[in-house]
Amino acid sequence: MVDVTKWPVFSLMGTRQLSTIRKASVFGTSANEAIYVTKDDEVYVFGLNCSNCLGTGDSQSSIVAKKLDFLSGRKVVSLSYGSGPHVLLATADGELFAWGHNGYSQLGNGTTNQGVAPVLVSTNLLNRKVTEVACGSHHSMALTDSGEVYAWGYNNCGQVGSGSTANQPTPRRVSSCLQSKVAVGIACGQTSSLAVVDNGEVYGWGYNGNGQLGLGNNGNQLTPCRIVALQGLCVRQIVSGYAHSLALTDEGLLYTWGANTYGQLGTGNKSNQLSPVQIMTEKERVVEVAACHSAHTSAAKTQSGQVYMWGQCRGQAVALPHLTHFTCTDDVFACFATPAVTWRLLSTEHDDFLTVAQSLKKEFDNPETADLKFCIDGKYIYVHKAVLKIRSWISSRSLSV
């Protein structure tokens, strides 16, 4: 459960108004713009309104929250922002909306006209259900429920994955070696892109000057290229910072690569890494990693709930993971990142009052807590030894009766 008041932009909001917030995101070059979703699925925005990124239909800044009527009642499942800035929002119905800066067609509507209000992105996405969105500085990505990856916008380094460096005005499926793969996660650096597929392989494309694609070199890639150094590992989560990347495996192992000027790789030095290197090897199992393309900060959470941070933290370079007093990785970005943006869509909900059956259902096939996995037809199922022992004991008792 996250306390949004840790972000200064929410400090002017009253207690009653804060109590209505269910999800929120803070963005902007000075972390002075915000969007939030209420418990009634109403969407509100406030802040500086740079490049019309508030989507209110005008260019006026506001310290008072304004409702985006066009999005009323639509359940928000994913939201991302580009540092342009532009905003992408996906709903539970699989619809994709975009607004804000559009100088490179990062809104995907085929023009370079500023998006002053949310517009439905439909070109090439008809009959597709978008489940996740990601933004680089001026490019965009979307993941569908069938595992397809789409990209568009600024493409000077190949970050759209089209095989050229021409800007992409509308969503285009990223194919090449991803053509027959089922993607389950996407992430964007400033001008780079990553995708993880269902068997745990990771692919990267776009700018690679700092090694942020993890390919062992620093050459840009115009189409997706598999990170061979991660072969044999099953990656479950990927995140990207400004020019560095992190990957978390199903066994709780953490790998980092790319730019390291601020120690954001957590290796103890400031040398860039062209290939993934494992960190936090002496720590317990990692269950979550965090980074965003607006910052040089990294964070991780372990199985027991300990939160570590490293990289650029309030202007200081922290080259080794530092144990904090925080209970979630979001707090690291609220208190130490520059700017103090959010690395993901925040949720103020918590999981209290779950029944035993609900708790077991929540943990079933959960790679974050599982201690055993089975491979069936090339796909993994994550289980718990304790639950299997209980089931086995119950079955044996039933047979003996």
Image: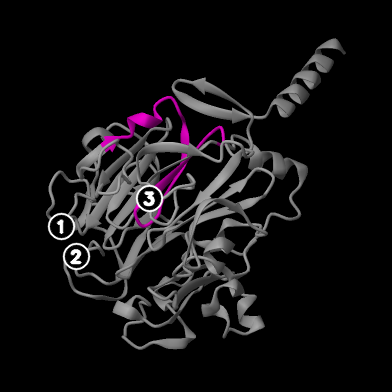
Boundaries of the magenta span: 225-252
Q: Position of residue 307 (x, y in %)?
A: 62, 53
Q: Quadrant of the N terminus?
A: bottom right
325 displayed left or right of 140: right
Verify whether residue 66 appears in magenta: no
Q: Residue furthest right?
A: 401
Query: Badges 2 and 3: C-beta atoms under 8 Å apart?
Result: no
Mark-to-mark CA distance, 1 and 3: 23 Å
Q: Position of residue 118 (x, y in %)?
A: 33, 72
Q: Nearer the viewer, mark 2 or mark 3?
A: 3
Residue placed under numbered mark 1 in the picture:
167
The residue sitting at 53% across, 34% down in the picture is 250
99 displayed left or right of 69: left
Q: Which numbered marker is on residue 244?
A: 3
Q: Is residue 125 visible?
A: no
Q: Position of residue 221 (x, y in %)?
A: 21, 42
